[in-house]
Amino acid sequence: METKPNRPTAVLYVHGMGGSPTESEHYRALFPNCDIVGLNYQTFCPEETGIGLYWKDVVYIREKPYRWHVPTHILYGAADRLIPYDAITTFADAHGADVTVLEDGKHWFHTDEQMAFLDGWIRSLQR
């Protein structure tokens, strides 16, 4: 497949809590020339597993922060109760990302209206 500069060749979809990697199929029509990969994301709290953070790890991370060099666009739901807006804007400011806010959106976009907004947002970024 011939690729154009700054055009994706693969899309990684990471589902939210309670979701499924099969949800990635929704994006196939939006990215017809890309491989669509749904990841089965699972997370844990270190405290729940007895794994703690060591101070040396915290110091290492602070001294060698990851520098994000990928064009990034964030769609945020204004009614998101999991991720505070200031966490989003702090990340965006640090990494040159832009943020679009869906006023009626929550953390999980799933209604027909929210999905239509998401699809339109993605199409606008592809132009």
Image (tube, helix red, strand yellow):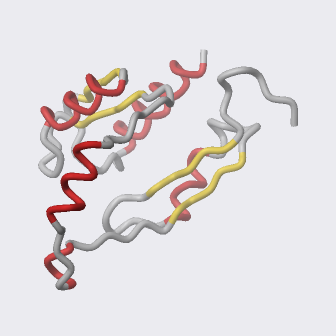
The x, y position of residue 74, in whole percent, is 36, 31
Residue 101 vs residue 116, the one in the foreground: 101
Q: Residue furthest bottom?
A: 50
> Looking at the figure, which quarter contains the N terminus?
top right
| Up-down relation of residue 39 to residue 110 (above or below) | below
Name which residue lies at 59% across and 21% down: 126
The x, y position of residue 18, in whole percent, is 33, 69
The x, y position of residue 84, in whole percent, is 12, 41
Name which residue lies at 68% across and 27% down: 7
| Up-down relation of residue 43 to residue 60 (above or below) | below
Numbered disc total: 0
Left or right of 11? Residue 89 is: left
Specify the quadrant of the image occupied by residue 41.
Answer: bottom left
The x, y position of residue 103, in whole percent, is 20, 28
Left or right of 41? Residue 61 is: left
Name which residue lies at 24% across and 38% down: 105
Residue 17 vs residue 98, the one in the foreground: 98
> Looking at the figure, which quarter contains the C terminus?
top right
Left or right of 72? Residue 11 is: right
Specify the quadrant of the image occupied by residue 52.
Answer: bottom left
Q: Residue furthest top?
A: 127
Name which residue lies at 14% across and 77% down: 47
Q: Residue furthest right?
A: 1
Residue 63 vs residue 32, the one in the foreground: 63
Specify the quadrant of the image occupied by residue 9.
Answer: top right
